[in-house]
Image (cartoon, rainbow, N blue to C red):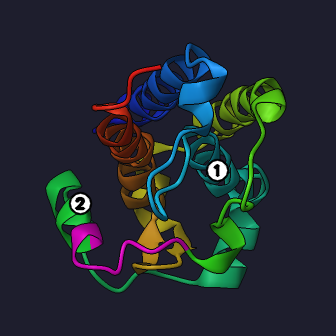
Amino acid sequence: MTKCQLIETFVKNHQILVDYIDQLEEEGYLYTQGRKWTAGQQLHHVGSTIVPFTKALVSKEYLVQKFGDLDRSTWSYQTVLDNYAKTSLKAPEQFLPPAEVSFEQKETIITSLRSDLEKISALLELYEEDELDLLVIPHPLLGKMNIREIFYLMGYHPIHHLKQIKTLLNDYKV
């Protein structure tokens, strides 16, 4: 994917998730079975995972100094997803949603997420194509990844959670 395609996919897939959750009534938004996350918790989690990019992408120099180089070739989109599927798929503690994400919080979370998407898109625009393959950001489950790889994953991430929400709500009738 080119930089433009990465940005477009990242924003579009987050918007698909947000639009789906935004149309949920309170009962669907708060519905859960067992220990499954509610749609609100899924939304909170996805929003919290993009916040670090609003800070990390500000300085290319910071990325180089803090995280160094990637000593392997860039993974393809499919390789990123395959490697992600081999992890625990468990959210690290700092990205776990609170035990309850109220219906009243929905609009605030959505507004914040949309704002962060705009910031991240603008920051990614400042990067050259080759910098996407050279500059590194660590992922909590996959370790060092270059920016292109991490945005392959971050473009997929909201769709992964949308599928979980739809599976949870599949048999649920509000």
Q: Residue at x 27, y 39 (%)?
A: 1
Q: For the view shown, which residue lies furthest in the top direction? A: 23
Q: Magenta segment, which residues?
A: 84-91
Q: Where does label 2 land, which residue?
A: 81
Residue 169 in picture, x, y percent from top left: 38, 33
Image-quadrant location for residue 76: bottom left
Which secondary structure dominates the residues rendered in magenta? loop
Q: Residue 89: say if magenta.
A: yes
Q: Describe the element under mark 2 as helix, strand or loop.
A: helix
Vertical order, 113 against 18 (above or below): below
For marks 1 and 2 on the same chain, the one whose residue lies earlier in the sequence: 1
Residue 68 in picture, x, y percent from top left: 57, 84
Vertical order, 42 against 84 (above or below): above
Image-quadrant location for residue 60: bottom right
Quote the CA–CA distance across marks 1 and 2. Answer: 18 Å
Q: Hey, what amino acid is under mark 1?
A: Ile
Do we see residue 75 in this rendering? no
Q: Residue at x 70, y 26 (%)?
A: 114
Give the label on residue 50, or none. Answer: 1
